[in-house]
């Protein structure tokens, strides 16, 4: 029989490893093509790995809970074919050929164990590669905790660690007890009473919590606010929502109109649609617009409208509605929740007037919209001022003050407000 390798797949850009959460098949189980063999999870998405072949599970190479690098062999499948050749396998995990062209698959060697120096527990994630380098340098997890990372969600990369090691060798790194860090704040003891209910955080909630804390540690946040007269937007939507749905087969909401205006404003202020890599500002050529979506379980996911600057209003509505619906069904593809350059969250859908959202790293800004609410307003005109009732909405923009200062942040939402207040016939 021939053997076939099941490989840990890459679930989106910047993903270098995934956690095996549950084996759906055990050794000796029969597999049919497209049968799911394992459930895996990253900090962005959960997924199942299907078998591309019929066969029998010969060997599972990792246990549930193990973190495995992308590209590693995680299971061996026996499939019908010629008898295996007894030739020795290669040492580089590659597929070799016998004289009969029968592939021989080497089982991967077990990962190098982590030294005792860094086996102490930590809530922060470190990849196996980083752990192995730290082991060789005799660096403990306690020492790595405060080191800022430039990877996804503030993750410590190989380059970050090597740079830290160079500083350490040159004596530029202060002793741990002298470092001024907020990575491990002193928390007041929690007092529990007999009637309290204790609820363990789920895996996704833990990841969200870690992502939020690290964002605040990475970026100095500033938030600017502006109040917007939504009269023209409300009037247009009320007059056109039925015909829009009939023509385009999807609903048009205020969210879609705000997204369209936000994209136009990003074209005017490219430094808002950017990232920071060390001391280099990366201006993104495409606008990949993240749309925070609340799930039924109380967690949050951010589907991304890729190349949103190429979409008109009907395209934004169709794409956003499709992504939101599939997000709530846990049916998004990995690439549909990665690569975002800017994020929007609609706090108004929950009745909130406004809020101060936390930046979705490694982006530089996040926009929030509050509820559209009728208010008494001063109406200015060439004939003089008057009092009237207007549908008003508060926009807030949180931004990374390392790159975006108050002037730029304020000018961005001012331009966005102008697009909404002067809303007329959109590009459908």
Image: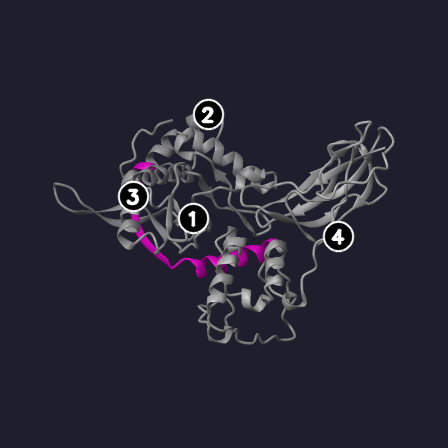
Q: Label 1's element?
A: loop
Query: What stretch of residues is rendered in magenta?
Result: 204-233
Q: Are marks 2 and 3 in contact (CB under 8 Å)?
A: no
Above or below: residue 239 compared with residue 90:
above
Could you tell me residue 241's position as x and y percent? 41, 31
Label 1, label 4: how far apart the Cα atoms are: 35 Å
SS assignment at label 4: loop
Distance from Cα at disc 3 to Cα at disc 4: 53 Å
Query: Horizontal and vertical percent for residue 297?
Result: 60, 50
Mark 2 Cα within 10 Å, few/some/many (few <14, many 20+)? some
Q: Residue furthest left?
A: 383
| Residue ID for mark 3 | 417
Give the number of the mark in front: 1 or 2.
Answer: 1
Q: Is residue 234 left or right of residue 112?
A: left
Instruction: Locate residue 113: give its quadrant.
Output: bottom right
Question: Could you say which is closer to the camera, residue 380 or residue 342?
Answer: 342
Given residues 120 and 226, the one toward you in this image is 120
Q: Nearer the viewer, mark 3 or mark 4?
A: 4
Q: Which residue is mark 4?
A: 63
| Whether residue 294 is situated above or below residue 215 in the rendered picture | above
Mark 1–mark 2 CB contact (< 8 Å): no
């Amino acid at each position: 029989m021939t053997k076939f390798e099941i490989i840990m797949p890459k679930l989106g850009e910047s993903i270098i490893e995934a956690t095996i959460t549950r084996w759906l098949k055990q050794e000796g189980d029969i597999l049919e093509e497209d049968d799911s063999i394992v459930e895996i999870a990253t900090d962005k998405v959960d997924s199942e790995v299907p078998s591309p072949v019929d066969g029998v599970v010969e060997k599972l190479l990792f246990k549930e809970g193990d973190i495995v690098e992308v590209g590693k062999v995680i299971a061996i499948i026996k499939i019908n074919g010629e008898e295996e050749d007894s030739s020795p396998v290669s040492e580089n995990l590659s597929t070799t050929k016998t004289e009969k062209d029968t592939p021989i698959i080497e089982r991967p060697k077990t990962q190098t164990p982590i030294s005792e120096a860094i086996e102490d527990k930590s809530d922060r994630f470190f990849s196996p590669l980083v752990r192995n380098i730290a082991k060789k340098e005799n660096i403990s997890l306690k020492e790595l905790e405060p080191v800022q990372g430039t990877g996804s969600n503030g993750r410590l990369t190989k380059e970050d660690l090597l740079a830290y090691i160079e500083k350490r060798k040159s004596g530029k790194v202060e002793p741990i007890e002298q470092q001024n860090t907020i990575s491990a704040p002193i928390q007041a003891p929690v007092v529990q009473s007999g009637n309290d209910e204790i609820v363990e955080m789920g895996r996704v909630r833990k990841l969200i919590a870690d992502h939020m804390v690290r964002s605040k540690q990475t970026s100095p946040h500033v938030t600017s606010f502006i109040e917007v007269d939504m009269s023209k937007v409300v009037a247009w939507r009320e007059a056109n929502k039925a015909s829009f749905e009939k023509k385009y087969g999807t609903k048009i909401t205020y969210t879609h109109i705000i997204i369209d205006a936000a994209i136009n404003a990003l074209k005017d202020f490219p430094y808002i649609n950017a990232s920071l890599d060390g001391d280099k500002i990366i201006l993104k050529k495409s606008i990949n617009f993240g749309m925070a979506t609340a799930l039924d379980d109380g967690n949050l996911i951010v589907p991304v409208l890729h190349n949103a600057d190429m979409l008109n209003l009907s395209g934004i509505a169709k794409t956003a509605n499709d992504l939101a619906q599939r997000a709530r069904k846990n049916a998004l593809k990995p690439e549909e929740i990665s690569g975002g350059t800017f994020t929007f969250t609609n706090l108004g859908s929950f009745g909130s007037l406004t809020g101060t959202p936390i930046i979705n790293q490694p982006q530089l800004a996040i926009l929030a919209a509050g509820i559209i609410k009728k208010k008494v307003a001063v109406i200015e005109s060439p004939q003089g001022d008057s009092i009237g009732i207007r549908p008003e909405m508060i926009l807030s923009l949180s931004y990374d003050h390392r790159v975006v200062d108050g002037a730029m942040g304020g000018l961005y939402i001012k331009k966005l407000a102008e697009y909404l207040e002067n809303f007329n016939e959109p590009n459908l």
